[in-house]
Image (tube, grey):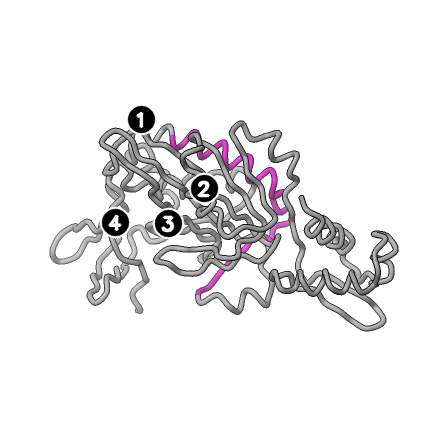
Amino acid sequence: MNDHWLRKRQILACLSHKGFVSGEAIAQKLALTRAAINQHIDALKDYGVEIYSVKGKGYKLANAISLINESELINNIDNRCFYFDETHSTNAFMLNHASELESGDICVAEYQSAGRGRRGRQWLSPYGHHMYASLFWRLNRDITYASGLSLAVGCSIVKTLQELGVEGLGVKWPNDIYLEHKKLAGILIELNHHSDTQTELIIGFGINMSMSVEQGVLIDQPWSDLSAMDNMPDKTMLVVKLHQQLKRDLLLFEQQGLDAFLQRWNDNDLFINREVTLLMAPNSVTGTCRGIDKQGAILLENDQGTLAFVGGEISLRAS
């Protein structure tokens, strides 16, 4: 860790309790000048950390920040683990180094300067507030077998969070996890290379842990995070447990395909047996959601029968 981030993490540690802390107290503790403290705090704000500043009282975090314990993370991950305070995007890092990776290698970051979501959307990645990670996986099957993999990954994330005490979870086809009917997590799977016998994939995922007000207003859909929990999961342990669950489920997927996950998906599907509209610009299809098939397609039942679709986005039809 370079001095740039070491100092910022030390300042965040000073601000970790609920009250205000004066700049002078932080400067004395870290043997820095007040000017240096101010510069680091201004830089943290640029990284999406919301910090209250009140004359005569000092500084205070607007939201709790959970940072990874790097040594604990690396010691508990049984693959290569790359951890960064800052990177362009975890998916991009893994794509750039794919030739050096083995299945299960993972990259985790506290901040992404160019995080990406599905369909090229930006994924807001304020420093320390959430979890951003990407897993490399070499699937010993041709690319057609990878259809529906994002649904299996969604099941892994839900199971891990449920085991850590998170309630009110649900999945939205094809790659979103919701908490209390608002988006909590997303998945972005990118192809690196494929042949007739092997498919290399980068599985990116982000989980909202503690959204600041400033960042929340920039999101164009209802969102949720884990901050309302009485005992919010420790981020380091969340990554470790999720890594373990993903490896188990990816091996299961390779052996049995999506068939092994159909019941888990249906048990958590927010839209099953509800009327939905599948948007596929410039067209749309309305029907009753009947879950998914073994290829990961969504099943809609209407006057034409039960139809399978592999593209589009779900939205509930207005009543």
Q: Residues within 10 Å of mark 1 (few under 14, many from 20)?
A: few
Q: Which residue is mark 2?
A: 94
- Please tell me the numbered disc located at residue 255: 1
Q: Secondary structure at mark 4?
A: strand
Q: Amino acid at mark 2?
A: Met
Q: Amino acid at mark 3?
A: Asn
Q: Amino acid at mark 1?
A: Gln
Residue 224 point in image, percent of width and height: 51, 58
Measure how far apart labels 3 and 2 are at the Cα level.
Answer: 20 Å
Residue 233 falls within the magenta-colored stretch: yes
Measure how far apart labels 1 and 2 are at the Cα level.
Answer: 24 Å
The region drawn magenta spans 221-250
In primary-sequence order, the first of circles 4 and 2 is 2
Q: Residues within 10 Å of mark 4 (few under 14, many from 20)?
A: many
Eyeballing the image, is 317 above or below 87?
below
Residue 33 point in image, percent of width and height: 84, 60
- Please tell me the numbered disc located at residue 298: 4
Q: Nearer the viewer, mark 3 or mark 4?
A: 3
Q: Nearer the viewer, mark 3 or mark 2?
A: 2
Q: Nearer the viewer, mark 1 or mark 2?
A: 2
In primary-sequence order, the first of circles 1 and 4 is 1
Residues marked 3 and 2 touching at CB (< 8 Å): no
Measure how far apart labels 1 and 4 are at the Cα level.
Answer: 22 Å
Q: Which residue is mark 3?
A: 175
Front residue of 3 and 133? 3
Q: Amino acid at mark 4?
A: Ile
Eyeballing the image, is 75 above or below 275?
above
In primary-sequence order, the first of circles 3 and 1 is 3
Q: Secondary structure at mark 3?
A: loop
